[in-house]
Amino acid sequence: MVDLTEAYIKSLAFNDAAFVNAKKLVAGNKIIGTYITKEEDLIFGECLGSGKSTYKTSVDFKNPEEVVFRCSCPSRQIPCKHATALLYQYFSNPSLFKEGEVPEEIQSKREKIEKKVQKKRTEVDKPKKVNISALVKKMKAQLQGVELIEQFISECLMGGIATITAAQIKAYKTGLVKELGNYYLPDYQNKVEYILQQLEYALRAEEDYKMVYYKRIIKFLAQLQALTKLSKATLETAIEQKKAVDEQSAYAFTKMGYIWKLEELKNLGFNKEDGQLVQLGFYDYRDEEQKAYIDQGYYLNLGEDTIYTTMNIRPYKLVKRLKEEDTQFEMILTPQFVVYPGEMNKRIRWEGYTTQQITKEHLVQIRKQAKRDYKVVLKEVKSQLKDTLAEKNPVVLVHYKEIVQLGENFAIRDENNEMIALAHAKSAGTNDTLLALQCLLDKEELKDQVMLGIFEYRPEDNKLIMQPISVITQSEIKRLLG
Amino acid sequence: MNELLLELKERLEHIGIIGLKSVTEDFRLKKIREKLKGLSSKAPVLNKLYELVNELLEGNISVQLYVGLVNLVNSILCTQGNSVVEGETVEIQVLEHKEPIKYLSRLELNTVRNTLDGSSTGKWASLMTAYKNDKLIDYRLLEDFLKNIGDKYVYEDYDYRRPREERKTLSMVEIITSYGKPIVSRLVKLFKTAQNYEKTNIVRIMGRLNDGEYDAQLRKWIDEETAEDVIVQCLSALSSSEENAKFLLAYSTKKKKIQEARIMALAKIPEEEARAEVKKKCFKDLNLFRMVFEQDDFLTEEEYLDLLREKAKSLDKIEADQKTLNSGRKDYEFLTFLLRYIHRYKSDAIREVLIELIETGIEERFQSREISRSLFQMKDEESLAYLANLKDQQEGYYITISFVAALKLYSPERVYDEFAEFTTRQFKNVKINLRSLLEEIASKEDFVKYNSACANCEDRDTCASSTFKARDSKKQVEVAPNETVILDVKALKWDKRWVDYAEQMNLKKLITYFTLTTMDEKNKEAVKIKYLKALDAFKAEVGEVEFYPNIADKKRKQVEETLKEILIGLLKTGGSSIVIEHIVYFSFYLGFLEQILFNYLEMEDMPLLDEVARQTEAISNYRREKIEKFIKEAKEIIYAKNGKNFGPLHGCQ
């Protein structure tokens, strides 16, 4: 049995409401007939619902990194509140659990899981043979799709985006957008739809705001064009060489919106062992382009100086069925995690994990990874920003000699008195954190600490600013964002 | 260089908006090309830009070229971004955290944020729940609260089981204030761009946090602002200091609301000049006085006493026949107000003045006898004893207050003995109604409030909390909070007295109570005889008058009620056979039969029901059906309780 903590159970819960409801079930003595196996790898019991019959629920720790929740209730949330309640019941009062045998039903389910795991292992050991001719056929279709998009961009810019009428937008929506569905380019489909949506907004907007939309569209079209260029080159090479995604083309395919399976990334070597991941910042935002809510976390793997990103993408259509991520106050221990191809803050994912409390020693390790020379930091950030296709809000862990207030503005200074302006990075979709910075830091913490910040370039005043996400002191992580 | 790049960016955007086809004729882009040409030798990237722009203008109208140029300009601009901040160094204001900071999780933060986006009371109920669960005070939420700073809604906890003073209130001002002083600099910044309704809340928060350090800012706003409400708030937010006293004494305005706020602000300052100014204004204006007087340290006892005497004296000058006090209305109101706050100054001197005012007849000018009420509020033995003796004045109100005072001082037995004579008299304008008091005591077995008897008494709260509780045969009498007397009902042998009293006053409930509980057989017989007499009198008066079933008929209802009382009284004093004789007789005309039966049903008198059933054969179908239905149901209840073999047990003679 893993060491249970309230934070760990909360992190496993489907969302905050599910956790709160689970606690209510426990408080209301709704969990009855609870058992634990001799090996302490399974707890099971029943939960009183609103109807006559009870729900049979269990939490399986056979693989401690991948806890399996089961319940006979009709909820689509996994874990449901009943299973979470069972776990919480065990956490709050384990003496209520009698020793019991593994029920047959669960035993057979365990066996099925075991078979699946075996199958996965074989896939990693012996990668599945790719049907190259089918893949080439698919890529050719994609290439056709990309060419259609190029044509769309060209039509927009040659005639001028201000001349596009509502009827044209409608025609694109019913024609091009639908057609792109046949070319295996869901990401592009979203992007074109987003542009059309912005064009619609521009048509409806007041004269002053029209320009805001138009400028945004021009920038977006230019980026899309750059992406089509990269996509075309990548697809043409892949078709010509008749090969699937490899290490070289992985970045380009990721940018094209390729949906990676974890095994694929592992097979390409994009993985790391024994992750000790500490979440240094977390927030969520709406991404109109992807039509989804994004839960974004920033992690540091102890011993590395890279800030990784986690992205839990919850499309609007599936928002009720997908688990929401939340602030992770404890360290994630995972035997393996995969790293997506990317820039400074590569996306990571893992499957099974346990948690551990963050100690002062861990904080020392984190603080050691902070970059101390702002010249180097800014160079690195700018280098990413100038890449048209790169993420526009890189995140960096920096050490500061002091935080200063100059007039109404804030900045951090390094030991060479180089400065980074602190401000709200609006384009990242974050909440402002400067007030929280003033409120959460003690006087002595204004000096010699480590800060995680998200960068933004503001063309209107030509400023490169950083928004503080968290401050890592000797004793705690001061979370300014979430 | 940066300006040029921005110019180029703008131009390219413009071209994208109107279309690339006309790019060759764009004279502004041509100008930019010239500038770029001049700079092209300085950096390779500028040379690259020049080449691309030139190519575009030369007629190579290609989307690829255009897009490449846009992306290049954007990329170069990003690398140009500077991260330097300029300005004077300011000390950063931070909080001193005495306790470890608690962090809400992101989802919890989102819940509060989403709640804030909601509307009306639902939103505030949720915020209150969050507040109670300690989920509202997280510095990361402060920005969100500040966005709602203009919200003036004050939510009161909906738990009406709690007394009002214990109910928690919540408002945006309270929430933001709880974040403490570090937010003030932010508030000052916010003030510059805020609307007037937001400004008032900003100042309210600052006022709550002000220990003097924000006075300079507040004074500045008082001088600069034009909105009346904002100035009023600023004045009330000022702290008590010498500097503020000087400022306020020098400050003048014609606006009444601001003048009042100024005096209120001055009243907080103990400076002599400030006090003098406050008194000067207040003594002329009761409203102002009232507001200022809320502040405890405004008047010393001596000053209070002087004022009391002064106002009473001026009242005395008014001719005796001017009872309405129109000419002395202001002084009258002033004096009334002063008397209401007498509890702040409980001293012998005050008592003496009050007694003097009562004895000199000044109090007669007061319709509600405020002076004796104030004396009652002194709550000391001397005052109460004085009041208890006032009953001898034989005036309705004095008997009332005297009774309440006596209740506080003496045992109920003594009170009863001393006041029994008044129960038989009718008083006009009797504020405390002894009759209703005694009736209340008698009619409720275990819990009697006598607040209704103390109507119009200032001590109403005390009265309301005073309860008579019965424990077995003993009554625990709480004459005042934490002050109880055990009253043994049986030992007192009050029955006779109650019955006599009931007869005199025709108190139906009293009879009902005592015939059911403590009345012995002898007394029961006496009461029964009285009821029989009443029945005869009733029959003689009413006769066999037919009443139509019109519920709005007041007289019919009155007659029904009287008859019902008589019959129930008879039932309960053992006269059930007489009741049977009359019950059907009257049921031809009146609609109370079921009710009487229902009352009697508690005795489970089967023979009575049979007798009624027999007699109803003679009456009209409608009435009969109704009564038969009732008898059927009643018998079912009795059977259900006792089984089918239940036979005549008692009751019917």
Image (cartoon, coloured by chain):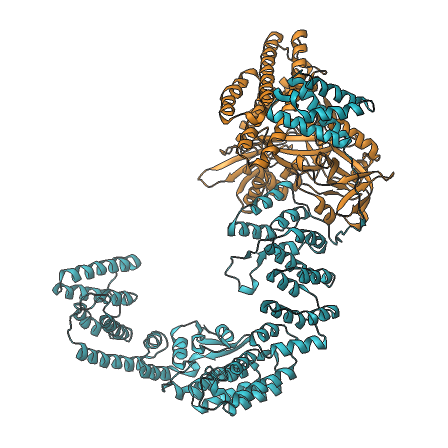
Which residue is painted at 80% across and 24% down in the image? B38
Residue nearest the viewer, comparing A257 with B85: B85
Residue A383 coordinates in the image, percent (x, y): 77, 27
Left of A418 or right of it: where is A87? Answer: left
**B568 on left or right of A234:** left
Q: Is residue B124 above or below residue A60?
A: below
- Quarter of the figure that contains the C terminus of chain B: bottom left
- Compared across the picture, whether B645 is left or right of B345 comes to left
Q: Nearer the viewer, residue A217 or B541?
A: A217
State left or right for residue A293 relative to residue A276. Answer: left
- Extreme residue toward the left, this view: B618
- Chain in cyan? B
Q: How many marks?
A: 0
Q: Where, by quadrant of the figure, is residue B449 drawn?
A: bottom left
Residue A343 in view: no
* Figure quadrant of the N terminus of chain B: top right
Residue B391, compared with residue B573, is above or below; it is below
Residue B252 at x, y percent in the picture = 66, 70
Residue closer to the observer: B433 or A68: B433
* Residue B445 at x, y percent in the picture: 41, 72
Image x and y of residue A313, in percent: 61, 30
Q: On screen, A23 above or below B613?
A: above
Q: Colour of chain A?
A: orange
Q: Is residue A200 visible?
A: yes
